Amino acid sequence: MVDLKNIVKRFGDLTVLNEVSLSVAEGAVMALVGPSGGGKSTLLRCINLLEIPTSGSVDIAGDRLEFRPDLRVNSKDVHRLRRHTGMVFQNFQLFPHRTVIENVTEGLTTVLKWPKERARERAMMLLEKVGLAHKAEVWPSTLSGGQQQRVAIARALAPSPKVLLCDEPTSALDPELSGEVVDVLAQLAREGTTMVMATHDLRLASKIANEVIVLDGGVIVEQGSSRDIFTRPQRERTKRFIATLT
Ligand code: ADP
Ligand code: MG
């Protein structure tokens, strides 16, 4: 479902990703772990093309774009590919002046031009899925962090993306509140949602990821099943890093 080949991302002289290749099968969950500054967020942003890779190729659901420093990117292609993805951020990023349900319908009515009623029906279905149908008409600020993140997940899923990208979805939450977000993501994983998530949350990664990639200094230093990576990492540096996760 997601296939990245030889992704390089440079900011000026700084190479942040260096020849990163990965594949995520349909229905699989991949966790990106590794020290801060290792390139996890940049890699997610290269998948949804919020960052344009310096070189390499991005293929989502068979829709493939190739990047080269000397090749102009076509913004129409970029928008088409981006629509295959939904993104969940560490700090939720809900629209504060929209109710919960409006947060979920917004993209459907403005970008996809769905009629309001149809958008509300889909939003209610998604809010039910994340256990927040009863909060549809309230302001996001009245919700706990865990509830806000569940709304953000519903919003990301509204346009039926092919892949859900999550950037440290539980990092801003206390352990009690992160549990409810982990449960929602675990449920989505069981239902076959394809996901790529950057996380420091060992509970999240070990509970729902099939495959784990350790990204350090912009390169993949280790890759394997979540059981192998978390219970018998091969490299000393990975061992030390895993020991710092909570
Ligand atoms: P992680 O999410 O693993 O902590 P990031 O992808 O955020 O890592 O960052 C990787 C590196 O890229 C860091 O050194 C960061 O400073 C750098 N970086 C990220 N975005 C930019 C940018 N827009 N301009 C310059 N450097 C950036
Ligand atoms: Mg990050």
Image (cartoon, rainbow, N blue to C red):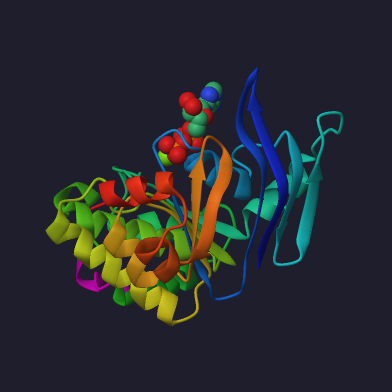
Q: Quadrant of residue 68?
A: top right
Q: Residue at x 33, y 52 (%)?
A: 242
Q: Residue at x 72, y 33 (%)?
A: 54
Q: Is 168 displayed left or right of 48 in the figure?
A: left
Q: Is 164 displayed left or right of 202 in the figure?
A: right
Residue 82 vs residue 134, the one in the foreground: 82
Please provide the residue range marked out in magenta. 130-135
Q: Is 139 displayed left or right of 27 in the figure?
A: left
Residue 228 vs 22, above or below: the answer is below
Q: Position of residue 80 (x, y in %)?
A: 71, 54
Q: Residue at x 38, y 71 (%)?
A: 208
Count the marks.
0
Q: Position of residue 94 (x, y in %)?
A: 34, 47
Q: Quadrant of residue 188?
A: bottom left
Which image quarter holds the N terminus? bottom right
Q: From this viewpoint, which residue is outermost toward the top?
A: 13
Q: Position of residue 239 (x, y in %)?
A: 36, 51
Residue 96 vs residue 53, the one in the foreground: 53
Q: From this viewpoint, which residue is outermost toward the right?
A: 70
Instruction: Let me know if residue 134 is in the magenta part.
Output: yes
Residue 197 vs 240, above or below: the answer is below
Residue 20 vs residue 48, the one in the foreground: 20
Residue 108 vs residue 77, the one in the foreground: 77
Q: Quadrant of residue 67?
A: top right
Q: Is residue 48 among what the camera can see?
A: no
Instruction: Let me know if residue 238 is in the magenta part.
Output: no
Q: Residue at x 17, y 54 (%)?
A: 143
Q: Is 237 displayed left or right of 128 in the figure?
A: right
Residue 193 vs 30, above or below: the answer is below
